[in-house]
Image: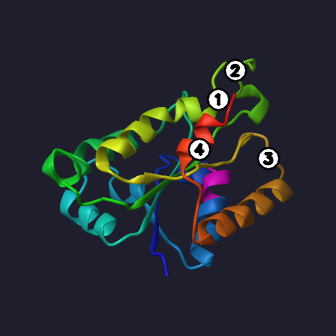
Amino acid sequence: MMKTTILLFHPHLDQSRVNKALANAAKEAGFEVRDMYALYPDFKINVEKEREVLENTDRIVFQFPVYWYSSPALVKQYEDDVFTGNWAYNGGKALLDHEWLLAVSPGADQDAYQKDGRVHYTMPDLLRPYQATSVLIKTKFMTPFISYNASNMSDDELANRAQEYVQYLKQPELQLAERYGQSQA
């Protein structure tokens, strides 16, 4: 069975409805969920430990809210510290063929994230730097799990979305994002 580890990056998880609900549903379903801000509130990442976690995981999930069309700062710090050097690129192959999945929650609804919407960019457009990083570190970049309208979900919508997340994570095969991103107009 595929080992999945969720790295949860939310600087204010106590104030989160969506990321907290998704993470709790995943935990209850038996997935390992690591609260990265709780582990590294000072941004001093234990690189050896994190590399060990990633090496022993088949499907790596980065779960985070979308802030200013990007991620919380600890995501970038994690990439800078953990993926660097000869470990994941420049000849390093530690993550070769691991699956990398983003589970993101933008506050606006999906209509806003269209070329003719108020944001003028799709989520695949905004997530493209992660896809490029995936190419560099030789992971398989899977179709992101996007929870649109995070700021306005009803309790029922949120409960349904959390169950959809668990079902998505349980899938033995996910679609590669290359097809996903290119299919968006």
Q: Earlier in the sequence, mark 2 or mark 1?
A: 2
Q: Residues within 10 Å of mark 4 (few under 14, many from 20)?
A: few
Relative depth, front residue between 102 and 46: 102
Tell me: residue 105, above or below residue 3.
above
Q: Which residues are magenta?
A: 16-20
Indicate the position of residue 165 as horizontal and vertical percent values: 67, 62
Say if mark 1 contacts mark 3, CB within 8 Å.
Answer: no
Residue at 66% across / 68% down in the picture? 166
Which kind of residue does numbered mark 1 sit on?
Thr
Residue 81 x, y percent position in the rendering: 23, 46
Instruction: State the mark number for residue 153.
Output: 3
Does the magenta portion include 91?
Answer: no
- Distance of mark 4 from mark 3, alpha carbons? 28 Å
Location of mark 2 (residue)? 115
| Element assignment for label 1 | loop
99 or 80: which is nearer to us? 99
